[in-house]
Image: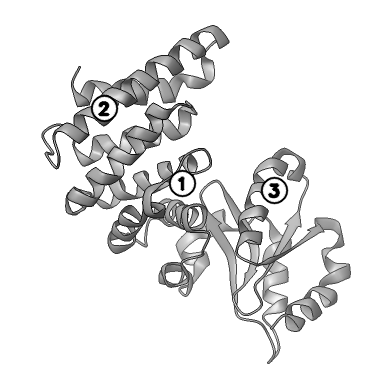
Amino acid sequence: MNARDMTEILWALATMGHSFTDAFAEDMHLFVRALCGEAATRIAQNGDSVKIFQPQEISVCLWALAHLGTEGEEVQQFIDAAYAYGERNISNFSEQNANNSCWGLAVLSHRYTVPRQGKVFLDRATELLDADRPESVRQLNHANLALTHTINIPLYYRVCEQDFRELFGNRMLTGSKEDALVRWLRTGEDAPHFLSNMPLHGFQCDILSNDTEVNVEIDGPHHEDRREIDAFRDRLLAALGMQVIRIPEEMVDDVRDDIRSTLLLHQ
């Protein structure tokens, strides 16, 4: 089986994984582990040869493994081999290849060790980032946060110092309450320097202040459906030393003076 066949199989399994029965899923994970072990061995044996694996195939495999959730030492071996391959061949990675690799490693980092916090792929994706593609920006910001536990402020400024409404439309905003609160908090000479709605892949921060290291989250009617992913985001922000303030949507107008006072207190 060649590298292209392996890649297409992993992609197909990841795409259809939600429909598998428990019995088939168990066999599938055994098969995926075998593929990872074989791929890692081939990459290690062939050094920097792009004839064995292409950058696109590496990125798709990492993407697929992130979706499949397969566990085993063979997956770690493939991650290590893929990263070593990236270090040798990073100049051959396109913006999309590097960005997808970053996203895959970010998800995998919750179960596996990612060499050097994915630096070679993060640097390449940042270098080639197309700031006119919101999805790429969200993926890369999420990867930075998950892999390095830092927010890449220069990267964020590349898009968000522009008119974020023109660039992202309403997809950045979770509701009119956030928009109204940001506009109100920006009034006055003592207004904190806001990054506003921080786009992350799959989730976002409602209101983030660069001056105060405070994140304000407004919980709307769909919060219960997103509780798990919101809690994950809050843990990442806490790892940065940031304070997270959660407010029910219906209380925003009543406590906005308190929010401003809290933000000013932390400046």
Q: Local crowd at mark 1 within 10 Å, few (<14), some, or many (≥20)?
A: many
Quarter that holds the N terminus: top left
Q: Quadrant of residue 207?
A: bottom right
* 105 relative position to 5: left or right: right
Vertical side of 28 occupied by 246: above or below = below
Amino acid type at image mark 1: Ala
State the CA–CA distance, disc 3 to disc 1.
17 Å
Residue holding disc 2: 39
Residue at numbered disc 3: 231
Residue 104: x and y, percent?
41, 41
Disc 2 to disc 3, C-alpha distance: 35 Å
Provide the secondary structure element on which disc 2 rests.
Answer: helix
Q: Please name which of the two marks, 2 or 1, marks the residue nearer to the observer.
A: 2
Q: How many marks?
A: 3
Verify CB contact (< 8 Å) between mark 2 and mark 3. Answer: no
Q: Which mark is residue 106?
A: 1
Near-viewer residue (81 or 121): 81
Sequence-first tag of 2 and 3 = 2
